[in-house]
Each structure stands twice: as structure tokens, then as C-alpha cells.
Image: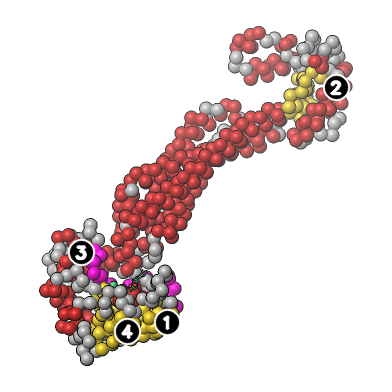
Amino acid sequence: MIHFDNVTKVYTNQNRPALDHVSVDVDKGEFVFLVGPSGSGKSTFLRLVLKEERPNSGAIHVAGKELSRLSNFKVPHLRRRIGCVFQDFRLLPNKNVYENVAFALEVIGKPRRFIRKVVPEVIELVGLEGKAHRMPDELSGGEQQRVAMARAFVNRPMILLADEPTGNIDPATSIGIMKVLDRINRTGTTVLMATHDAAIVDSMRKRVVELEDGKIVRDQSRGVYGQAY
Amino acid sequence: MRANFIFSEVWIGLRRNLTMTIAVIVTVAVGMALLGIGLMINSQVSSMTGYWVDKVELSVFLCKKNDVFPACKDKPPLTDDQKAALKQTIQSMPEVERVDFEDQNQAYENFKAQQGNSLLLSVIQPGDLSESFRVKLKNPDNATAVSESIQGQTGVANIVNQRQILDTYFGFLSKLRNMALGVAILMVFAATLLIGNTVRLSAYNRRRETGIMRLVGASNIYIQLPFVMEGVIAGLIGGVFAAVLLIVTKVLLFEGIQSYMAVPLGWNTVAGVITFTMAVGVVICVLASFITLRRYLRV
Ligand SMILES: Nc1ncnc2c1ncn2[C@@H]1O[C@H](COP(=O)(O)OP(=O)(O)O)[C@@H](O)[C@H]1O
Ligand SMILES: [Mg+2]
């Protein structure tokens, strides 16, 4: 589903690579934690999957397509098949929960009838039933992140990228967020989550890919955050 | 494509930048109105040129008794035979198509028809007016040459080249047109900058929305269209104001001086000019929006 082949990314005006000859394979339906200290290249990895950034060398395949061969014109279609969640939620403050989720479908031109059907379903999936008409500032951080997950998942993406989704949320609430991500993963969606939250990684026992200074230093199935051996 | 989605975004954008939007509308309106006025003058000049070109004549005035023209000093007026001979001379020039004689009574009739000024009419007698030959040329461009060669003939007081009068008049209209077009270009330039600024503000105001749109895979058209539509709508409203200004100009100005124009400016022309200026206004707005978007909206 995601295939990195010797990928190196150096940002302009930086001499140290953000990713340094990274090769990794993520299969369809996998749940993968991307761990490592701040600045180790986790966000860069996710941005490369979205083709928000371009690698300096190496090849990236996403959903069977080589990204460097994908014309700019086709990038939006790639992104429709990838959902994204961020630490800062990125909700529209002047739209309520329903409208925030529906926005993702409206802007890709989905018909109104379809939107009216699927948005309530996904709001229920993330556990926000009954709160569809709340505004973002009337929700807790955990609830806002659920809205963001509903928006990321409403178009049934093949891949869900989560960049430190629990970074702004207290540990108790984070468990709920992880449950939703697990639920999404069980529908067959590949989940790639960047985090440096050791407790969460340890509790989930999923595959762990650890980055340090842009290099993969560990790739372990059913791993924990710290060095297990 | 969800039209109502786009329109609600456009409406929000226009309201959020109300002052800028008004500035754009006013500049587009003034610029397009001036462009239109320039085009209207242009069309008036060319239709009048067409009308007058085959009517221009040389008026060769003959000396009358005690004439004050230097050429007539101490010379008696021509006898009828001399007039016939002069007419023959002029007639035989290769550039000349036709020569008509206008006697004093005809001159007086024409003068009466042209002059509304009754005071002038009451003091002028047929005897005060000169007899003349009306010389029609095959090609009005030769007027100067022909007039120079007639000038030397005895009995000729002076020659009026109508072409010169028209040229002066057309020259004035051309200057007016150039001024209108010049200011129009300045206004178009100002409008472009204003639209650029509006789009930049708009892109900044909507950066959250556009960021999410990019992320969920909205196509570039979908992301850019609301901005471009803002420009188009501001341009169209400006165009409507310009159309009103042009209609007012036509009614107040062109119809006011119509009696001197001989060829009226038709409503067809006005409609054509309005359509053209509107199209120019909208195209400018679209281009300005697109160019700014490329710079301020990463897609
Ligand atoms: N847009 C950017 N321009 C320049 N350097 C960047 C940019 N984004 C990230 N970096 C650098 O790349 C390295 C990896 O950053 P990042 O991928 O954000 O790491 P992480 O998400 O693991 O904290 C860091 O050294 C960071 O300073
Ligand atoms: Mg990061």
C-alpha cells in the first residue's frame, strides 16, 4: 500500500537530510506506528506520502502508483484516497460538526444526497452521535479530534495518516481516540500514525517503525515504544 | 461541481472584503466607461469621415466689388466671360470631377439655411456675399495641390478647403478619444492591482478552508473558482455601472451634439461598445485573479 524505496529528503536551506535513505513497506490493512523524537522526520514521511513534498532521491509508491510519475493534476485524486488527522485538529471554527465533516465531501463535488447519508454514519462511528450541531469551541479536545477523524474517514480512504493525533489530548481521552483509530483500521483502512507517546504505542502492540535523525533504526511487528531488546 | 457551495463561498468572500470589493467595482466601472467613451468617439469619427469624405469640396470665392482680400486689391470683378473661362480652366484639371457656380442669391439662401443667428441675417445682404465655384474633387486628398494651382488665377479672392476644417475638428475628437483611452488604460492598471490585492486578502482569509480543501483532495478548479468568481462578479458589477455611464453619455453628450455630427451614433454601436467593455472588464478580472492566485495559493 505504501512503499518507500531508498528515499532521501533534504529541505532547501538545510544540510542535514530530514529523511536519509529510508526504505519501508506498509501492507494493505496494516496499523503502523512511526515513532522517534521530535525532528526525527516523522511528519516529513507523512508529507511525502501525500505528495506535499517531493523526495530528493528514491521512489515512493502509494496505492500502486509511483508518486514522481503522478502529474500535479492527479494529486487531488491521490489525496481523496488518503485521510489525514493532525495534532491541531484543523477544524473550521465557523462550521458545526456536521458541516465540518460534510465540507470534505462538498469540496470534492459529492452529491448532496450521498453527503446526507454518510455524514451521520461516520459521526456515529467516531462516537459523536447527538453532537452534530455543536460548534468546535463547544467541544473538548478529544471530541474535536473525533470530528477531525470523522472528516478524514468520511470518504472511506484506503490510508489514514495521523500526525501525533493525541499530542494535544490528555492520556485518558487518548485511549478513546486510539479506539476510534482501531475501529477505522478494522474496516480495512491502512493506518499510519506518527507519535512519541510511549504509553499508547506500548498498549496497542502494533508494528513500530522508529526513526532517528531521518534514519530507520528499528522496524518491529507487535512492538513497544522503547527498545524491547 | 456544487454551484451553491461555490456561490456561498463567493458571497462570504465578497462581504469579508467589502471595501476592497467596492474599490474594484468603482475602478472597473470608471475604466470601462472611459474605454467605452473612447470607442464611441472612435466610431463616431470613422462614420463621419466616411460620410464627409465624398462631400468635401473646395470653395473658390471670387472677388466682388471693393473686395478686401489682398488678391482682389484694385481689380474689378470678373466679367461673365472671364468667369466662364476660369470655370473652364478649373474643369480641365485632371483631379477635378465637377465644378458648380454659386451666385450671390444662392449663397444667401445657403447662408440663411445654415445660420440661426437672426441679427447676423438682418445685416447681411445678398450683395455682401461672394460668388464662388464649388469644386468637387475626384480624390479629396489632392485638395491642397488643386487649391494651390487655382489660388494664382486672377479674380480668385480665397479658397476654403472644407477638408482642412474637418481635419481640425476630427483632430480635436481624436485627442479626446486618446485621452479617454489613456485614462482607461491607467484605470485598468489600477483595477488589476486592486483585484490582485483583493485576491491576496481573500486567500489569506480563507487559508484554513483552502488548506483543508487541498488535504481532502479538492481539485484546483474547485479551490480557485471561488476566488476567480469574486473577481468576475466584482468585474460584472463594475461593468453594469460602466454601461449605465455609457448610456448616460450617449443621451446627454452624443445626442446633444448630434446636430453638428450629421451622422448620429446609433444604439447598435452603443450596445456593441457596452458588450465589448463588459467582456474586457471580466477578462481583466479573471486574469488578475488567476495570476495572483498562482502566487498566493499553493495548490
Ligand atoms: N518545511 C521545512 N523546511 C525546512 N526544514 C524542515 C521543514 N519541515 C521539517 N524540517 C526539518 O526536517 C527535520 C524533520 O522534521 P519533521 O519531519 O517535522 O520531524 P518530526 O515530525 O519527527 O518532528 C527537522 O530537522 C526539521 O527541522
Ligand atoms: Mg512532526
Instruction: Determine the CA span between mark 3 and mark 4.
Output: 40 Å
Q: Which mark is residue B13?
A: none
**Which subunit holds the residue at mark 4?**
A
Mark 2 or 3, closer to the camera: 3
Q: Residue at x 68, y 27 (%)?
A: B165
Q: Earlier in the sequence, mark 4 or mark 1?
A: 1
Nearer to the camera, B106 or A71: A71
Give the secondary structure at mark 3.
helix
**Extent of the magenta region:** A66-91
Residue extending furthest toward the bottom: A229
Check the residue under mark 3 and report the chain it is in.
Answer: A
| Closer mark to the observer between disc 3 and disc 1 | 1
Marks 2 & 4, CB-CB < 8 Å contact: no
Residue A153 in view, yes or no: no
Give percent across and percent down for residue B176: 57, 34
Asked if badges 2 and 4 are on one and the same chain, I answer: no
Residue on which disc 4 sits: A216
Alpha carbon separation for disc pair 2 and 3 = 98 Å
Whether residue B124 is in magenta: the answer is: no
Q: Which residue is mark 3?
A: A98
Tag 3 near tag 1, CB within 8 Å: no
Q: Position of residue A89 (x, y in %)?
A: 23, 67
Provide the residue designation for mark 2. Answer: B153
Give the CA distance from mark 2 to mark 1: 97 Å
Please determine if labels 4 and 1 lie on a single subunit: yes
Seen in the picture, residue B146 relative to A161 is either above or below; the reply is above
Left or right: B236 as drawn, with respect to A183: right
Identified at 38% across, 54% down, the residue is B200
Viewer can see residue B17: yes
Q: Residue at point 32% right, 52% down? A: B13
Classify the position of the C terminus of chain B by image quarter: bottom left
* Label 4 vs label 1, nearer the camera: 4
